[in-house]
Amino acid sequence: MKRSFLSLLILLSVGVSLTYAQNVRIQRVNPTNWWVGMKNSNLQLLVYGPNAGTLTYTINYAGVKLVKAHTVENPNYAFLDLTIASTAKPGTMQLVGKRGSQTITQPFDLKARDNSPKGQGVTAADFIYLAVPDRFANGDPTNDKFADMADPNADRANPFFRHGGDLTGGAQHLDYLKDLGATAIWFTPVLENDQPLTNEGGAMRSAYHGYGFTDHYAVDKRFGGNEAYKSFVEKAHATGLKVVQDAVYNHVGINHWFIKDMPGKDWVHQWPTYTNTSYKQQPITDPHASEIDRKVTVNGWFVPFLPDLNQNNPFLANFLIQHAIWTVENFGIDAWRVDTYLYNDLPFMNRCNQALMDEYPKIHIFGESSVNNVVDQSYYVRNKIDFPFKSNQPGGLDFVVYNAITNNALKQKNNDAFPLYETLAQDVVYQDPTKLVTFLDNHDTDRYLSVIGEDFEKYKIGLTWLLTTRGIPSMYYGTEILMKNFKDPSDAEVRRDFPGGFPGDKENKFEAAGRNDRENEAFLFVRKLATYRRDNPVMHTGKLMQYLPQEGIYVYFRYDNNKTVMVATNTSEKEISLDTARFFERMNGFTSARNVLTDATLTDLKLVKLPAKTALVLELGK
């Protein structure tokens, strides 16, 4: 089956034009438009349609020059190199293609750039809220399903089908996020996933998660389409929230239009027989690794229905980079999370990152490289290690801190915080560790609450660490209301609908009245810490000093010239009176403190009572 599928891809890439005989049409031009006044004056248009590559192209528009027209294996494609001078004016230019007596004219808009917020980036001052849009809130039931799509299903009773969440629903709950203390919203991908159901583990599953793009320039109409996304971003900005978009460069969906009719065989990574990635990151950084192991990791496919893109193809590379820039300019997003970062061609990623940063100097990019040690993690971001390859990625998802907190410090029997301390002690390898995005769980992991045995006191300790230590904290939707579950038997268990986000829900946990006492306690705990972090620069730009954990006690300080905050956690099963003499470097001169979580005042700092499994956040005073 897999061998047949790969052969089909090769056939499509070189022979599909026979289907169209001698017809000539232009069906699409990507990007769909561009702007005057961009810092990079170069633009490459992908022109597609039956025998579009057989046309001779001209452009007659002031300030725009057609430098070169490229043809490829498949005659249905042409790639046109343009330069757009700084003197070019907004308007509609005509792309003219001729073959013999036939003339085809295709309009292409050059727009004026506006002054709306875009590419603002996220920093340690932010708190990112991650959600799966299909499972978060349904604001428009009329777009739940469409008969003309490869997957026409929507059924909330089936955990593997689409449930109908959309961008309108997300926009309706932006005030909830702001009240919680979030400053940025990150949805898993919103681009069109016109994918068929796939059989995984004996169950038919939809692509509701969004990681199988089928058209880069179309937001999925089940989420509301391009206009709904524009509206969502505008409303988020008006609410004071930034927007992070999920990028996928490594692969696309099997139903992507350019996979059905590829420009050439080298558009995707081809193998004699189907070859899956090993999912092992070690061959990338291992100085002793074999070339075949490295190649299988990077060029192997994730799964048979997600073709692995060959970013060494210069036309594909330009297509992906220009789409990223187009997205920021068109929708106004502020930052990128990059899926499966380590599986991409890394020189390509450097080029893509740089192109984005050149146009939007404040933009932040943080990729997913699921590794288990600091050295490997540093390889994919700006670092201080003498690696043969130097990444320019500003940030990354901090999987090492995630493992240190969730799977070590709070999961093991003695609850020792040393794994977190040890991880942060190695921050010297990064150029700027504050640009790493920290988290306790996400859409690909077991939910945090379940991993720690549904222990509410541990829950509060982990969230305290997340919201008070270095980095850019990110929280998975529902963690604030104690949503739980493991990935076994499926990922759908950790991607359940947010109660109250869908018509007919019996409970509405967006409202305090819909939450039980413990859920409200959790929500208010997160809100208290998140708003304190947001409103106090010491918590995001202040320095960090940590002390070796001893007998379950882990103490660190965030401090600057204006404030000093002490974070003390007791992960042991017994109450402790903490003698603070050891912390004189940071506490000297302070005689009192305000408990940030309770607003209580401490007038004696010599001994601080720490009940079992407790987190204290103390703003020191004189």
Image: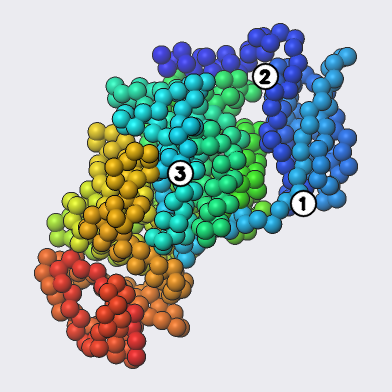
As displayed, is residue 269 above or below residue 3?
Answer: below
| Quadrant housing the N terminus | top left
Viewer-side residue, 371 vs 36: 36
Residue that appears at 39% across and 23% down: 198
Label 2 residue SS: loop
Which residue is depicted at the point 53% across and 37% down? 224
Left or right side of 470 for 231: right
Q: Residue 87, position in %: x, y?
A: 85, 50
Residue 74 marker:
2
Residue 574 at x, y = what percent? 11, 69
From the image, tell me which residue sits under label 1: 37
Front residue of 195 and 281: 195
Q: Mark 3 or mark 1, which is nearer to you?
A: 3
Cα distance between the residues tagged 3 and 1: 35 Å
- Quadrant of the rendered image containing residue 30: top right
- Residue drawn at (46%, 13%) of the image: 4
The dot on residue 169 is 3
